[in-house]
Image (tube, coloured by chain):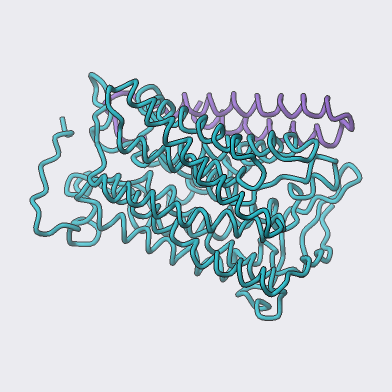
Chain colours: A purple, B cyan
Amino acid sequence: MKYAGLFVMPAGFFLTLAALALFPDPGRRLAFVLCGLAVEAMGLGVAIRGHMLPRGTSHP
Amino acid sequence: MSATAPMVPAPAMSDAVFALALALLLLAPMAIAGVALINAGLGRSRSAAQAMLGNLALVAVSAIVFAFVGASFTGSLGTTEVILHAAGKGWSVLGLGPFLLHRLGASSPQAQLAVLFEFLAVAMLVQLPWGSGADRWRLAAGCASAVVLAAIVFPLAAHWIWAGGWLAALGANFSAGAGFIDAGGAATVHVIGGLSALAMVWIAGPRRGKFPKEGLSTAMPGHNAIYVLFGCLLALVGWLAWNLAGAIVWIHAPLAALPGTAINTLLTASGALAATFSVTRFRFGKPDASLCANGWLAGLVASSASAAFASPVGSLFIGAVAGVFTPLLVEVLELALSVDDPTGAITVHGAAGLWGLIAAGFFAPQAGQLLAQLIGIAALLGFIFPLIYLLFAVLNRFIPFRVDPDGERMGMDLHEIGGGAYPEFVIHRDESYR
């Protein structure tokens, strides 16, 4: 859980790279880039959830 | 797939413009001094000397490491670069200049200015996670993080964005505006600094007693609001110089565009302060000094990306948005997500930097600029952030980030440097230990 989100985030980055390589049309490219950012946001959300500590603890 | 190719030389610069840019860069360290004061003031009094010494030590370490290794990988001194070929285009991913600044004196004046700008940028960058680690991050581990940031992370990003890398070439290769634009270091310094702060906070954990088993999180206010607010004023001077120098060095702005850039910088910060002042006044009944300082700084950070393009009214709007979300996000991170960030660097530098980059996409005159900015943001979040986390996690195995419990209880000053910042004052017992 802690690291899963951090592994998902590069997947979103590679989606944006794929958008550049695959779509010459600016509209489709923008849509694909936004999808890549959405995947990164999901990964970040999972990473945040995974790093939340139980109350009363200080060490991860 | 991998190859090297000669880099494109920088365009010529007149002597007068060179002298102006150099003078501005000599003022830019005021921003570094301001951030150092803010870092020290937002920590506790028993850790103030360690915090200030840390700021100084990290700047020194980053400068040495960048001179030895980092500057060669940014590629600002020319020679060669590593290029990957895909989709019929060349993607420049890393510079391969001479080590130890070997050809600095023989380089063009503009290349030398670029390297000086990068030295200052990396010095500012390493300070940002240091502030978030206040009261628990060991000095040795902080210096080690500066090594990693100055040798690997910053050079990679600076090459991509400033030194003709694949993000800078998005315009030429894929018709995405003028390529990813970051004239003042919103991405290379502030977003990366904010993301480094998040990685550090996750790895080191919160201060002892910050999140007790029952009730709300414990308030641990900064020990000196004057340091913090004076640091904000000092930062304004540095930021004005930084944004103007960046406009000259990185986007080759004409001299006539510089007064507008300076006015936009001031307006963005002012809009942010007014918004944060209003939000905290509305939420808490009185304006909150440390959150207002955060708002002011968030405005300055957002201006780093947008000041060279936005209109004055647009700058006010960009600042106002940064000033509204800053206190709210600081609160969400602390209360809902258990993130203990004493200086608010994750919000102030990370989130406000991202907002500034998006705003630059809206306000820049070139068509397709927003796409370029979004691709750059995707690279920062999807590649640079996991890389920082990985490097910090490995570093933590060898040089533990967190001080031992006794050190935290005693205070970082006594534990790490053997003397306090205020030896004549009585340091009160910490009421947060429950």
Give residue B331's quadrant in the image: top left
Q: Position of residue B212 (x, y in %)?
A: 24, 26
Residue located at (69% from left, 73% from top) = B109
Judged left or right of residue B412, residue B61 is right
Q: Position of residue B64 (x, y in %)?
A: 50, 69
Judged left or right of residue B151, residue B247 is right
Q: Residue furthest right?
A: B88
Residue located at (38% from left, 48% from top) = B232
Give residue A60's quadrant in the image: top left
Q: Position of residue B118 (x, y in %)?
A: 59, 61
Judged left or right of residue B381, residue B210 is left
Give residue B258's quadrant in the image: bottom right
Comparing B244 with B64, the one in front is B244
User: From the viewer's perspective, is residue B163 above or below residue B427?
Assistant: below
Q: Residue furthest bottom?
A: B105
Q: Position of residue B221 (x, y in %)?
A: 25, 37
Comparing B117 with B401, the one in front is B117
Judged left or right of residue B425, residue B420 is right
Q: How many marks?
A: 0
